[in-house]
Each structure stands twice: as C-alpha cells, then as structure tokens.
Amino acid sequence: MDEKQKREEFTHCWLEAEPSVSAYVFASVTGFHDAEDVVQRIAQELARRFDEYDSSRPFLGWALWIAKSRVIDFYRARDRTPVVFSDELLGQLADTIAKQADRRSHRREALEACLDELPPRSRRLIDLRYVEELSATEMALETDTTSGSVRVLLSRVRTVLASCIERRLAMENA
C-alpha cells in the first residue's frame, strides 16, 4: 500500500472512530479545551502510528486503547489535578463506547438499506431536508406543493424509515 492509500485508509478509519473517541475523551477529561487538545493529540498519534495498526482488528478498539493512555497521561502531567476516573473505570468506559459504536454502525447500515427502498418522491424529500438542509417552505417551492404537505409527508417517511430500521435490526438479532 502506497502513502496515499495509507492516508486515505487512515482518514476513513478516523472519520468512523472520531465520534466515539471524542465521546470517550469528553466524558473523561474535565474542561472543553483540554478535551479538544487531547482528541487532537490522539488523532496525531494514531496517524503517526497507523503502520502499527492490525487491520484484522477493529480500528475503534485500537483508537480507544490509545485514547485511554492519552487521558491517563493528561492527568499524570497535571499532578496537581486529581484523576477523576480510575484506570479501570476508563477501560470500562472505552469498552462501553466501542459496543455502542457497533450498534450505531448496524443502525446506519439498516438506515442506508431502508433509504434505498424508498419511492423516489420520498427519497427526494429526505435528501432535500437532510442533505440539502432545506426548510419546509423551501422544500415546498422545490416540489411544487405546500409546506404543510411537506411536513406531513416527511413525518410519514420518517415513520416508514423507523419501522424499516427496527425490522431490519430485529431480523439481524434473530
């Protein structure tokens, strides 16, 4: 794998893991700016050490292992600041976040499949609202209907999507 491919692979892995890593750090580090700094240091370290990552294992687990170490380092470097969480509790927090990320990933896959099943008009409304971020009024102009109709249709589409997602997840767990 050449350097460009490594950077692309790292970027992909980091973008998927970053919300969970950030949640872990922000739950572990007091102070918004300190937590942001720790997340940045983690991202830099992950990028620098990406060659060490075993791609047969989940990236998130590796990233959280590094994150746990950086959070502990953060508190050790500030010896006058008490450690808010024990090493054991930080480990449990990392495990919980990793498990939740798996659930979110399955939910996202179910959402993508359900979106593909929508009729074109319904899919267009979802895209206008959530991709293009249009208001109901702007969507009404775009679809030649009223904003009230747009709101009702969006509500129905959301209900269909929610049912579809729950059905798919239930089938996965059966």
Image (cartoon, rainbow, N blue to C red):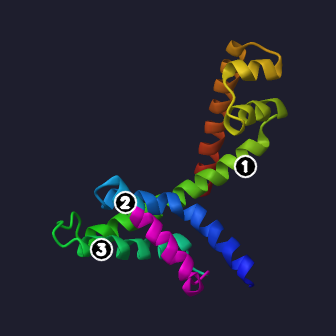
Q: What residue is rendered at 81% in x and 34% in y?
A: 119
Q: How crowded is mark 2: few (under 14 residues within 10 Å), some or many (20 or more)?
A: many
Image location (x, y in percent) of residue 41: 44, 71
Instruction: Name the magenta segment's main secondary structure.
Output: helix
Q: In which quarter of the image is the C terminus?
A: bottom right
Q: Residues within 10 Å of mark 3 (few under 14, many from 20)?
A: some
Q: Nearer the viewer, mark 2 or mark 1?
A: 2
User: Please, what is the three-letter code of the amino acid marked with disc 3?
Assistant: Ile
Q: Which of marks 1 and 3 is in front?
A: 3
Residue 10: say if magenta.
no
Vertical placement of residue 30 versus 151, above or below = below
User: Please, what is the three-letter code of the amino acid marked with disc 2?
Assistant: Ala
User: Would you name the residue on which mark 1 appears?
Assistant: 113
Vertical placement of residue 71 versus 165, above or below = below
| Dot placed on the residue nearer the N-terminal end, 2 or 1 | 2
User: Please, what is the three-letter code of the amino acid marked with disc 1?
Assistant: Ala
Image location (x, y in percent) of residue 29: 31, 61
Q: Which of marks 3 and 2 is in front?
A: 2
83 and 163: which is toward the camera: 83
User: Would you name the residue on which mark 3 appears?
Assistant: 72
Residue 34 falls in which quadrant of the image?
A: bottom left
Residue 174 visible from this viewpoint: no
Image location (x, y in percent) of residue 139: 74, 23
Q: Report helix, strand or loop for mark 3.
A: helix
Residue 35, disc: 2
Q: What residue is rendered at 81% in x and 23% in y?
A: 142
| Dot placed on the residue nearer the N-terminal end, 1 or 3 | 3
Cα gap from disc 2 to disc 1, whole angstroms: 35 Å
Residue 6 falls in which quadrant of the image?
A: bottom right
Q: Report helix, strand or loop for mark 2.
A: helix
Residue stretch in magenta: 37-55
Cα gap from disc 3 to disc 2, whole angstroms: 12 Å
